[in-house]
Amino acid sequence: MTPLPTVRTALSVLLMLMATTASAEHVYIYRWVDPADGDVHYAERPPPHDAYDLIATEGPPPPDAAAEQRRRAIEAQAEQGLIDERRQRAQRRQQAAEAAARRDECERLREWQAKLESRPGSRLLVIESEDAARRMTEGERQERLAETRERIGAVCQDAARGRRAQEQE
């Protein structure tokens, strides 16, 4: 015969398990008496023989509060990592678009510089309004050429820096 404390221990374990359940899922507890020695057993899997009682309880016990907090922290870190990655991708796209715009501006300025250098002022037109245009003076041409060279220095240098930064990534 089974000693009384073993049965009481098994029953107390079963009662604690039933008292700590939280979800609507069913967890099945199998109870059987070992035919060899008469010990009472409880398990989540049925015994190899057919002589057992099936006890249905509501769901598993709630998760450990510390474990749940760690799980949430890990999920938050993963989510933050995704947010950071998306933000970095958006920044890289924006930087690439800005670099392309600087390259285009640099190219446009170099073309304008080539026109200013190859033609005398009298061959260049200054459009003053929709209906009026006049020939550029040599002084205006020299002034525009100096402005263009200065602008090329700033824009094209930035474009070259942006290109090098992209190549390093």
Image: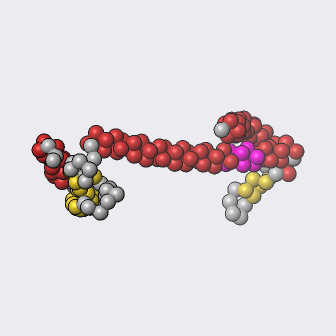
Asked which colour scheme the image uses, the reply is secondary structure
Q: Residue at x 72, y 49 (%)?
A: 104
Q: Can residue 150 be seen in this view?
A: no
Q: Does the magenta stretch include residue 104?
A: yes
Residue 133 horizontal/vertical position (percent): 75, 58
Closer to the camera in the image, 139 or 165: 165
Q: Quadrant of the C terminus?
A: top right
Q: In this view, does 54 lie to the left or right of 45?
A: left
Q: In this view, does 62 lie above or below 73?
A: below
Residue 125 horizontal/vertical position (percent): 79, 54
Judged by its main secondary structure, the magenta piece is: helix
Residue 124 horizontal/vertical position (percent): 82, 51
Q: Is residue 103 magenta?
A: yes
Q: In this view, does 42 lie above or below 162?
A: below
Closer to the camera in the image, 106 or 169: 169
Q: Residue at x 14, y 43 (%)?
A: 3
Q: Which residue is drawn at 68% across and 60% down?
A: 129
Residue range highlighted in magenta: 101-108
Q: In which quarter of the image is residue 48?
A: bottom left
Q: In this view, does 131 lie above or below 3?
A: below
